[in-house]
Image (spheres, grey):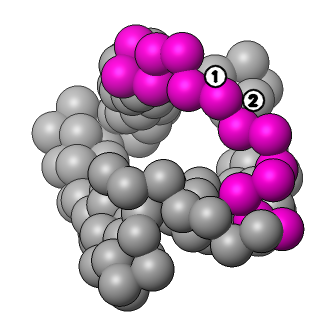
Amino acid sequence: MLLVWQHWLALLIGAVLFVAWGALSLPATFTLVATSLQRQQHTMGIGLQSLVRSVPMMLGPLIDGWLVTRIDWDQGVHDSLLLCCGLSFSAIFGGASELGEAEFTGDEIEHGDHVSG
């Protein structure tokens, strides 16, 4: 959104959408961890998910700040957004290729069966 409409309000709306996505994706992430790992590995799975999720949130502002001070405000924000979009698409397509033909029916949760991984 900020690539098209360069205004502070677009930044605020994007931040609200980012926080909303985090709240919506959390139950799906916990379900994925619960169905793909054995019961004794759940803590490790949640910890790894938290680490993978928090590292980009720590590095993102540092990289964006470096780009903004190195180039200028408009071009630095634009370049960092393009970098973020590129990394997001590579993560999506890389993750989709790793999933393969996995099936999820929902029976795993109701019956307490866990796929060993």
Determine whether 84 is above or below 86 in the image. below
Q: Position of residue 30 (x, y in %)?
A: 62, 69
Q: Residue at x 82, y 50 (%)?
A: 106
Q: Tell me the element at label 1.
A: loop
Tag 2 residue: 1
In the image, residue 108 lies in the stretch drawn in magenta: yes
Is the residue under label 1 in contact with that under label 2 (CB below 8 Å)?
yes
Q: Residue at x 71, y 57 (%)?
A: 108
Look at label 1 and name its amino acid. Leu
| Residue 56 occupies quadrant | bottom left
Question: Which is nearer the eye, 113 or 64?
Answer: 113
Q: Position of residue 115 (x, y in %)?
A: 48, 53
| Residue 97 occupies quadrant | top left
| Local crowd size for mark 2, using a 10 Å CA cut-off: few (<14), some (14–19), many (≥20) | few
Q: Position of residue 89 (x, y in %)?
A: 47, 18
Look at label 2 and name its amino acid. Met
CA gap, disc 2 and disc 1: 5 Å
Q: Residue at x 41, y 70 (%)?
A: 38
| Local crowd size for mark 1, using a 10 Å CA cut-off: few (<14), some (14–19), many (≥20) | few
In the image, the segment drawn in magenta is 97-110
Q: Tell me the element at label 2.
A: loop
Left or right: 17 as drawn, with respect to 75: right
Residue 63 appears in the rendering? yes
Can you tell which mark lies on residue 3? 1
Numbered circles on residues, count: 2
Question: Which is nearer the eye, 102 or 64?
Answer: 102
Determine whether 68 is above or below 48 in the image. above
Q: Quadrant of the N terminus?
A: top right
